[in-house]
Image (tube, grey):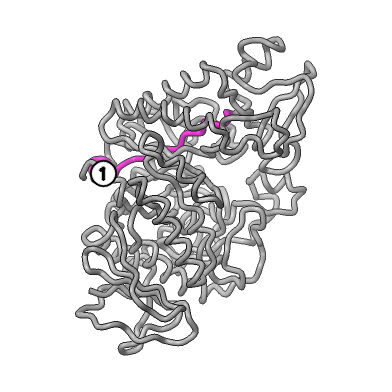
Amino acid sequence: MPETWWRGAAIYQVYPRSFADGNGDGIGDLAGLRSRLPYLADLGVNAVWLTPWYPSPMADGGYDVADYRDIEPTFGTLEEAEKFIQEAHELDIKVIIDVVPNHSSDQSAWFQEALAAEPGSAARNRFWFRDEPGDWKSIFGGPAWSQVPDGQWYLHLFAPEQPDFNWTNPEVHQEFHDVLRFWFDRGVDGIRIDSAAVLVKDFDGGDPDGYTDQPEVHDVYRGWRRLAEEYDNRIFIGEVWFPDQERFARYLRPDEMHTAFNFDFLACPWDPAALRHSIEETMATHIPLGAPPTWVLSNHDVARVVTRLGREDTSWDHGARRDGVPADLELGYRRSRAAALLAMALPGGVYIYQGEELGLPEVEDIPGELRQDPIWPRSGYTIPGRDGCRVPLPWSGGEPPFGFGTGEPWLPQPEAWNKLTAEAQAQDLGSMLTLYKSALAIRRDRLGDGTLTWLDSAPEVLAFTRESGLTCLVNLGSEPVRLPPHETVLLASGPLEGEELPTDTAVWLA
């Protein structure tokens, strides 16, 4: 792959607990993931990104990291992780891992040392300990300060089990430099930075959001970028979510991150004007900086795209997850096929969340006692949380566990998924899996990094052409529209009606 592989890559997100179970305990692991690497190679992705695989009490799905230099025993061993990286590289698949720099687990050696130490000690200075709590709220609900037995309080922007690091402390900087080197030395190609904008805190400005996008946070990532440049071709991807594209762009300066998630596009409703605005804003933000855009339809924190696009309100908002809102899954499936062709045709990189290529819907009827997302208890059991998009994948067979493993999966799979297994879809030319494979193969030859040129079209149609000559049309209107002159239909998200493109359908033309 070229030096700039990441600029136009198709990156597949693995949520390890739910991908494939190799040892029969009902939880996905590295053995399962390694056994399914040929599937990812056959799908046609360039890279795989894994959510945290470190030792963790799993208070927040592994984002409460107890040790950044080892592997969660449920998933396997460090030696297996090294084998996975090697095997992925042999299949020409790059490996991206998650680093969580804002907080650790309350079970980490550092935090346990802080609890045993005196107020004002060096061990406590790695975190935010105070004699009186502040009034900030946790992103997960409830207060952001918890008290320890000697009376002091510590800051946690997320769950109480996730104490925030003090990024004014040079020891914290050094620790993460060491962690980055640890994984780069093992061949990891990229790092996805969790909650990248909230590391630095301003307690004195009186701002309830005084932890977001503080100027000093950019110094952190400039230091990281200098470290990455000591290695060949390693990249940083930021989880940065701002409605303000200008603030977003600051993270993409040439001496900071290589790229960042485009949540604006993910959250956009199925509306031609809104989508075009999001695409144009994204391009206008990224192109002057020389940073490639990324296009994301879903991830492990967001209701699955088939369900979202089947709702009356197709936009996304973390604060209003709209669990249980009725969804027309047939409509959502049709639209999500079109959305996939739109996202893959756009210039830059594209992310595919595991199961997206199978057309899996959100699972909304998980019994309360089986839910594991901390949002569920912290909301007083009123917000079901993110478990519905984290249900283990269906691989094969006619009933659960659908080839995920031999044990009972950690979250229950719907019986109706027997029609959505990878095995069933592999033989079906009209399946979502076949669409993704076909699109990724064409994308590898004709799409990826670059720019686009908008074409004249009706207001309800998105139409643009790429440097390779490929033209993408998406009809978001209520009536079919005529196709422009073309030589070949390369791929369509649904059947065409003669020379017309039906509603909620996308087509690639040459």
Examine the rendering and report whether any part of residue 391 can be seen. Answer: yes
Q: Which residue corresponds to mark 1?
A: 4
Q: Is residue 104 left or right of residue 426?
A: right
What secondary structure is marked by label 1?
loop
436 or 37: nearer the viewer: 436
Examine the rendering and report whether any part of residue 24 can be seen. Answer: no
Residue kind at label 1, given as amino acid type: Thr
**Residue 1 pos. (x, y %):** 21, 45
54 or 483: nearer the viewer: 483
**Residue 277 pos. (x, y %):** 47, 64
191 or 31: nearer the viewer: 191
Identify the image quadrant of residue 377. top right
Identify the image quadrant of residue 425. bottom left
**Residue 436 pos. (x, y %):** 34, 64
Q: How many marks?
A: 1
341 or 208: nearer the viewer: 208
**Residue 192 pos. (x, y %):** 43, 39
State which region is magenta: 89-104
Q: Is residue 91 left or right of residue 114?
A: left
Q: Is residue 324 left or right of residue 410?
A: right
